[in-house]
Amino acid sequence: MKLAIASTVLLVSCNAYAFTNSFGGVINQQRSTTTELSMVLEAPKKKKKLAKIETLKSISDHLKTPLLEQLKTEEIGVSQDAMQILKYHGSYMQNNREVKGKKMHQFMLRLKQPAGELTPELYRLCDDLSREHGQGDLRATTRQCFQIHGILKGDLKTVISSIMNIGSSTVGACGDVNRNVMCTPAPFTSPEYEYAREYSKVFAHLFRPLTTAFTDIWLDGEKAASVEVWDKEVAHHDIDQKMLLDNGRGIIIPDKTEPIYGDRYLPRKFKIGVTVPGDNSLDLYTNDIGVVVICDEKGELEGFNLMVGGGMGRTHNKENTFARAADHLGYVPKEDIYEVMKSILASQRDHGNRDVRANARMKYLVHTLGVDNFRSLVESYFGKEIQPWREIQPFKYNDWMGWWEQGDGKLFYGVHVDNGRVKDEGDFRLKTALRVITDKYNLPSIMSPTQSILFKNIEPKDKEDIDSILREHGILPIEQIDPLARLAMACPALPLCGLAQTEAERRMPSYVERVRSLLTKLNIDDEEIMMRMTGCPNGCARPYMAELAFVGDGGNSYQIWLGGSPVLTRTAWPHVAKMKDEDLEITLEPILAMFVQQRQQFEAFGDFCHRIGSEAIATYTKSYVLGSVTA
């Protein structure tokens, strides 16, 4: 059997494996009947010409050039090459596509917030910066961090240095490195949840870029006034020592600045999520690495279940690009977690596809090799076999909105944010309300994976007043928010995203209303269907995991995807190639009618579609008469 992936070839013969290492040779691994593994480096084959983005990274002086020079010019934007390097610093250059004429460049800045945590000081700063240097609002992302839109080039240094000096960062919020590490947002004080938050910060710090480019450019080479908050919280792990530990198996490479990443960093972005058994509020299966904390009956940490190879991005009409749910890799004892995580990242660094960027995510490497061969690749770096996945309780989904007890006598409250937009608009003054609560009670908050915000550590005596503040600012109680809206997500799309083919965030509220009308018409108002929408196929709002998804494929049209799991453990499949906006009702009514007539007891909409399949739904639709079915 021979499996080929661009410049990487895996040869499988009995128990022998040979892995091409793009950083210097072929790694031969012979698996014996014991856990002893050996590795020998051989001379590399003739090198291929690097892709343009790979060349750019390698000559950037570890993410400085040409950005540093471009920031000094009088131009309102930066060059395309500088824009690529700027992503590693947490920013994208954008343009309002609805304003005709000369492009008026502006910048979006994304924060790094491991586990989604936000100190009250950082929230106040973001609120101030968005008003003084942005477009006045904040955008909660699907990876538990804030984005600030509308920043001018001349203000970037002020904004980024302010964030760094308060103990936060934008480093690694974008670019071909480990992105913001996600975690279940529920701030319960049980040991499992505490460990999940702790190790989210551990992994964020373990895989941080080490280049001085960030302080050189934004702080003029000086140290930040405060170290990153999460750095202080996990300092007892001695992460730098564990990061730089060299087991001699190829994880650490000969680059003094970036011994984990090298001067070309990763082939593509890399995402990690951490949770506890049973809690899939963060779409764990969409990550490059999904981590599940495993504790014993006393609440002591034993180790971690790991899954690999998830990812959402794809390209229309290119079947070799696809969304993928992660595979279960196995179980790792706590004492081995650093080396195994490093081994997985090194596997992607050395064997991921650097020739074809559309196939550069680790999901394609896992898919091509198969999870068993990928496990063998990881073991070749690790030096030991990975144990089998431990059985855990089934995953469930919860958005953690509304009032909850933390477990320590205090409360937390989840504030629903429609599609992540924190703004003041007429009588709806969400941005002001969040600032009033933060200022009055000095509460820390947590960004949720579904673009909302949780306040934690609330004294029970303050519950009534916080409810009152929200009502005074036009914020509805969670019980009055349509469940369809609570379950929905949409990416920003137009007018600022350069990749958007159509609307998402601005259109999703109307789709919630229109689908609600359809459910009412069919007399199934009690149904809760998870809907997601993106303006392009890149999948920022993770549409391919939803029960019902709308993926933009033209100026006013969408693909329809069906069959995702309500607990987010499998991908959906494409059902309609191109639905015009005005055809929403006539497209969905037959599908919902079939659901009414043929679903099993207590069967969710996504599970029904998954069981029935696209062909059966299409056949039913052909003979369906509009208005002929109600529950």
Image: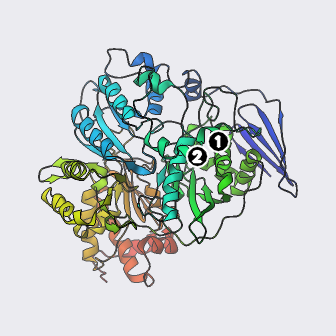
Using the rendered image of the protein, determine whether residue 495 is visible from the camera's viewpoint.
no
Query: At 61% across and 57% down in the image, what residue appears?
Result: 307
Callout 1: 10 Å neighbours few (<14), some, many (20+)?
A: few
Give the quarter of the image for residue 20: top right
Which quadrant, please, contains the C terminus? Answer: bottom left
Residue 624, quarter of picture: bottom left
Which residue shows up at 48% across the image and 32% down it?
88
**Image location (x, y in percent) of residue 220:** 42, 19
Q: For numbered disc 1, what is the local secondary structure?
A: helix
Query: On the rendered structure, is 66 left or right of 399?
Result: right
| Residue that numbered label 1 is attached to | 242
Q: Taking 273 as reference, is 509 left or right? A: left
The disc, 1 or 2, on the residue closer to the chain's N-terminal end is 2
* For residue 105, above or below residue 35: above
Color scheme of the displayed model: rainbow
Residue receiving disc 2: 237
Of tags 1 and 2, the one toward the viewer is 2
Residue 417 lies, in percent from the top left, at: 28, 55
| Marks 1 & 2, CB-CB < 8 Å contact | yes
In-image side of 241 versus 485 (left or right): right
Residue type marked 2? His
At horizontal 63% and vertical 27% (from top left) the residue drawn is 50
Which amino acid lies under the numbered mark 1 shown in the image of this protein?
Answer: Lys
Residue 275 coordinates in the image, percent (x, y): 51, 60
